[in-house]
Image (cartoon, rainbow, N blue to C red):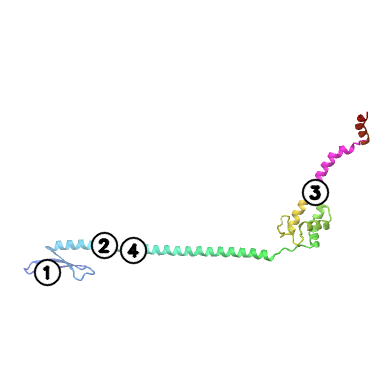
Amino acid sequence: MLCPAERKDKNGFTLYTLWIYIEGIEKPLACNYDSPEERDRDCMRISEAWENTCRSEEEITRRLRENEQAHQSMQESIRKTAAMIEEVRAAEGARKRTASSGKAKKKESKPFIPPTFEEVVEYIISKGYDQAAHQQPEGIARRFIRYYSTDDGKWRFKDGRPVHDWKRCMANWINRIDEDEEAQSSGSVKQNQFTKGVESNSYDFDQLEAELIAPEST
């Protein structure tokens, strides 16, 4: 705060004084001037400098406040993002646990039960396997059961793996039988074509033996 004043000294001369009150300082500062113009000019310069300082402080305070708000907003965003990540991880973990638990329950809840002879026959007839193979369904069923059943009453593949779905095994087994029969049929045809000429010729083996022995006797 600036307070211009005038007073006289002990000799009667007029003193032009500028009292400067600064916050936090008990006694004001006194500046003496030879003329009021000089005092007023200095007072104006000090006032402008003070106003500029105040404006700078206000701007600095405003920017600090904005930076603090931006910092708080950023911290809040980080906390929210971290919370969302934790929720996603928790949900993913719960989903995996549920899925693994469901698979375990599914495996435990469906133990393999070997089918009866009648069930196998009925399934063969329903799928038309007997018509395709031109065989009786009962014969196909017996061969199928003998192929997969073991002495301990369990069904296994030839490599020892347990059977879980006998109907799927039936489809694969029927296809394999068809391929084997086609291979056997093709082989028999080739064999018949190879032996056809031999069987059509008639040889007199007694005569051949006599011809072979005759030179030795002479």
Give the residue type that dot 1 points to.
Arg
Q: Is residue 215 above or below residue 106?
A: above
Secondary structure category for the residue under label 4: helix
Q: Tell me the residue that label 3 is attached to.
A: 181
Which comes before the other along the chain, label 2 or label 1? 1
Give the residue type that dot 2 points to.
Thr
Residue 9: say if magenta: no
User: Which residue: 81% across, 46% down?
Assistant: 185
Q: Tell me the residue that label 1 is attached to.
A: 7
The spot of residue 101 in percent (x, y) is: 62, 65
The spot of residue 81 in percent (x, y) is: 48, 62
**Among the 4 quarters of the image, the one containing residue 4:** bottom left
**Among the 4 quarters of the image, the one containing residue 138:** bottom right
* Marks 4 and 3 close (CB-CB < 8 Å): no
Q: CA distance from mark 4 to mark 3?
A: 94 Å
Magenta stretch: give its range. Answer: 181-204
The spot of residue 115 in percent (x, y) is: 77, 62
Which comes before the other along the chain, label 4 or label 3? 4
| Image quadrant containing the N terminus | bottom left
Q: Residue furthest top?
A: 218
Q: Tell me the residue that label 4 is attached to.
A: 62
Q: CA distance from mark 4 to mark 2?
A: 14 Å
